[in-house]
Amino acid sequence: MNSLWTDEHSQAVAAAAPVAPRPSPDRLDRLWATVDASTRSSAPDRRRRIRTMTGAALLAASLTVGGVATAAVYSAHTGRFPSDAEDVRLGGPGEELDPSAPDYGRVIAAETQDIPFPSQAARDISRADLVKDGQREQPGTGSVSTGAMRLWTAQAAVCSWSNEWAAARAAGDPARTSRASRTLTASSRWPAITDVDPQQTIAYKKVTVVDTRTGVRTIETLPDNTEAGYLPLLIRSVRSGDVDAVGRTLARWVYCIPGLMPDLPQAVPGS
């Protein structure tokens, strides 16, 4: 178990357990989204800093008056949208989708047509990965915003175009290389990215860390990047023709689906 305790942990605990009346369901949803964001750390979750939100109300919305779920109307579309700026910050903009619904893949396809991929096969891999990830949720217990889903799809597209760029360079194909380079440069202006992260910066902040075993307090400098803060670094590496730098940037800041990176394995940690 990690024994380090930061001031941010203390603030989170204080916020999670105040002396206050019983919280509303919406407030509980936002609280669990915050807790979830601070505790998950698996590799796929690097693409999911905008968290999937716990939403018992989704299950209630899928029930008939008699309390029986109606499979015929069970859809990823919930008709729910963020109620305030905090909801947008935690979950992203757009409708709250149910990723466990059987039509989630079709909704992804419809909502992400504007995001370019180098091939239909790469697009299909991206969509299948999101659907598989959504199936980890129990039906009606979680939601993901359209904005977050589109951002993850755009990140998968960036990964696939980076692989295309590396493959084209290795093949000595200047036209193909140029096309991939132009697409990656333009990715910083894709609406799927700018709707969530118009800043695209990587910054650092100083955090007070307390070792719970010894009580020793230290000041550490930690990354404080925006969702697509890696893009300026990636674009600079592409323009300089540094394949290894492109791979390192993706490996550190983005979750690239391994199936999308056969020609740029440097982008997949442990490959």
Image (cartoon, rainbow, N blue to C red):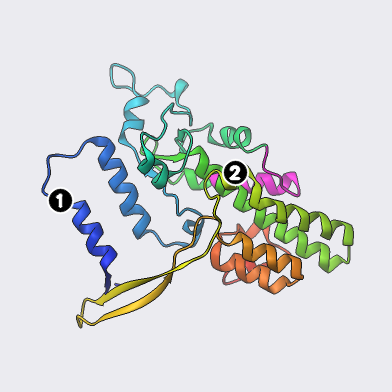
* Quarter holding residue 239: bottom right
Secondary-structure class at tag 1: loop
User: What residue is pinned by disc 1?
Assistant: 18
Q: What secondary structure is the magenta-colored segment mainly? A: helix
Magenta-tinted stretch: 114-130
* Residue 248 image point, x, y percent: 62, 71
Q: Position of residue 89 (x, y in %)?
A: 41, 46
Residue 110 in sight from this viewpoint: yes
Q: Between disc 2 and disc 1, whose residue precedes?
A: 1
Residue 126 drawn in magenta? yes
Query: Which residue shows up at 54% across the image and 64% down it?
Result: 253
Per the image, the residue denoted by label 2 is 192
Identify the residue shown where x is 82% and y is 60%: 177
The image shows a total of numbered marks equal to 2
For the view shown, which residue lies furthest in the top direction? 65
**Residue 106 image point, x, y percent:** 59, 33
> What's under tag 1, amino acid-wise?
Pro
Quadrant of the rendered structure where residue 250 is?
A: bottom right
Picture quarter with the N terminus: bottom left
Q: Nearer the viewer, residue 118 or 194?
A: 194
Q: Position of residue 176 (x, y in %)?
A: 85, 57
**What is the CA distance from the residue labelled 2 to the residue labelled 1?**
37 Å
Magenta stretch: residue 50 in it? Answer: no
The crowding category of the residue bearing disc 1, from other C-alpha atoms within 10 Å (few below 14, some 14 to 19, many at least 20), is few
